[in-house]
Image (cartoon, rainbow, N blue to C red):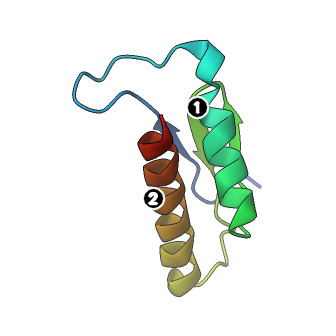
């Protein structure tokens, strides 16, 4: 308990850094895009919460970050 890493990623509009309109549910869209790729993350509004297991090998953490990056890019492109 109380060990490990937790990362919050605030999803903002490219260029301006402004918050997304809540009706777009950007955090939820990115969460679902990650799940379609086999990675479970959760969101609190438009903030993604990523918590890799403490014993997760570095290669899997890198894969996790690549999936999150790809999901964010896909959703941003669709908006």
* Among the 4 quarters of the image, the one containing residue 14: top left
Q: Check disc 1: other Cα within 10 Å, few if <14, some if 14-19, many if 20+.
A: many
Indicate the secondary structure of the residue bearing disc 1. helix
**The N terminus: image quadrant:** bottom right
Q: Which residue is mark 1?
A: 26
Q: Position of residue 56 (x, y in %)?
A: 64, 78
Q: Is residue 18 left or right of residue 38?
A: left
Q: Residue at x 30, y 23 (%)?
A: 17
Q: Is residue 1 shown above or below 16?
A: below
Q: Residue at x 47, y 69 (%)?
A: 66
Q: Could you say which disc has been placed on residue 78 in the image?
A: none
Q: Position of residue 28 (x, y in %)?
A: 69, 36
Q: Could you say which disc has been placed on residue 69 in the image?
A: 2
Residue with the most extreme front position: 78
**Separation of marks 2 and 1 at Cα, in angstroms:** 14 Å
Q: Residue at x 72, y 49 (%)?
A: 32
Q: Position of residue 57 (x, y in %)?
A: 58, 84
Callout 2–callout 1 Cβ contact below 8 Å: no
């Amino acid at each position: 308990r109380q060990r490990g890493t937790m990362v919050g990623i605030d999803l903002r509009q490219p260029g301006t850094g402004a918050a997304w309109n809540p009706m777009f549910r950007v955090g939820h869209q990115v969460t679902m895009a990650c799940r379609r790729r086999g990675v479970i993350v959760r969101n609190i509004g438009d903030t993604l919460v990523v918590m890799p297991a403490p014993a997760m090998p570095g290669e899997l953490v890198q894969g996790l970050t690549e999936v999150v990056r790809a999901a964010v890019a896909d959703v941003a492109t669709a908006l």
